[in-house]
Image (cartoon, rainbow, N blue to C red):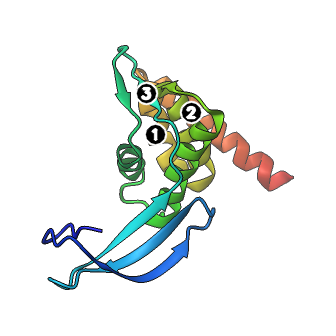
């Protein structure tokens, strides 16, 4: 594996372990040339998934882009990075298991917010506002009321 820091064509594996879901192998590596350490993941290779955007444009599914949007929703929240990484991995795996070659960005958004709801409610509202394209304050209030209702049901049950 080529070093991302200095470009040296080889690296040494320090540690290998499966991810929690068992869908990838995480490898810690070290460059013998510059000594930099970095992480790589070995994953199944599936058919590429094309994302159909709201405006009809198509682009390749990008797990890093998905994780970046999840990180933005969770900005200044105390959600561990590993939890968010797992969420992105779950969404990608769900799409791959469905065997779809094209998926709308709305479907991806629904997959994300359905998982965020149980992870962090503020991040859920932030993410929902983007994916559901909130244009009015009432739409925020509706989501907050729904969350409050779920909390009340949980407390009484």
Residue drawn where x is 71% and y is 40% of the image: 149
Q: Crowding near pointer 2: few (<14 within 10 Å), some, many (20+)?
A: some
Image quarter (top left, top right, bottom left or bottom right) of the N terminus: bottom left
Pinpoint residue 13: horizontal percent, then vertical percent.
38, 81
* Rendering quarter of residue 28: bottom left
Tag 3 secondary structure = strand
Q: Which residue is mark 2?
A: 110
| Of residues 153 and 44, the one drawn nearer to the viewer in this rendering | 44
Q: Which residue is mark 3?
A: 51
Asked if the residue at tag 3 contacts the one at tag 2, i.e. Cβ–Cβ closer than 8 Å, the answer is no
Q: Crowding near pointer 1: few (<14 within 10 Å), some, many (20+)?
A: many
User: Is 32 situated left or right of 129 in this image?
Assistant: left
> Against 72, is 41 above or below?
below
| Of residues 126 and 109, the one drawn nearer to the viewer in this rendering | 109
Tag 1 secondary structure = helix
Residue drawn where x is 58% and y is 55% of the image: 119
Pinpoint residue 140: horizontal percent, then vertical percent.
49, 31
Tag 2 secondary structure = helix
User: Is 64 situated left or right of 141 in this image?
Assistant: left
Residue closest to the far right: 157
Pinpoint residue 147: horizontal percent, then vertical percent.
64, 42
Between disc 1 and disc 2, whose residue precedes?
Answer: 2
Q: Which residue is mark 1?
A: 127
Spatial distance from mark 1 to mark 2, Cα to Cα? 10 Å
Spatial distance from mark 2 to mark 3, Cα to Cα? 14 Å
* Rendering quarter of residue 31: bottom left
Spatial distance from mark 1 to mark 3, Cα to Cα? 18 Å
């Amino acid at each position: 594996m080529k070093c991302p820091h200095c470009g040296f064509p080889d690296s040494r594996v320090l540690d290998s372990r499966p991810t929690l879901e068992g869908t990838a192998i995480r490898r810690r590596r070290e460059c013998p040339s510059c000594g930099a350490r970095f992480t790589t993941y070995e994953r199944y290779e599936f058919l590429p998934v094309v994302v159909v955007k709201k405006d009809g444009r198509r682009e390749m599914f990008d797990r890093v882009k998905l994780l970046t949007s999840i990180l933005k929703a969770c900005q200044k929240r105390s959600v561990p990075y590993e939890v968010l990484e797992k969420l992105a991995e779950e969404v990608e795996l769900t799409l791959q298991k469905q065997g779809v070659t094209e998926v709308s960005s709305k479907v991806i958004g629904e997959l994300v917010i359905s998982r965020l709801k149980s992870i962090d409610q503020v991040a859920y509202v932030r993410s929902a506002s983007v994916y559901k394209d909130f244009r009015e304050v009432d739409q925020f209030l509706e989501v907050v009321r729904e969350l409050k209702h779920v909390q009340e049901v949980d407390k009484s049950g």
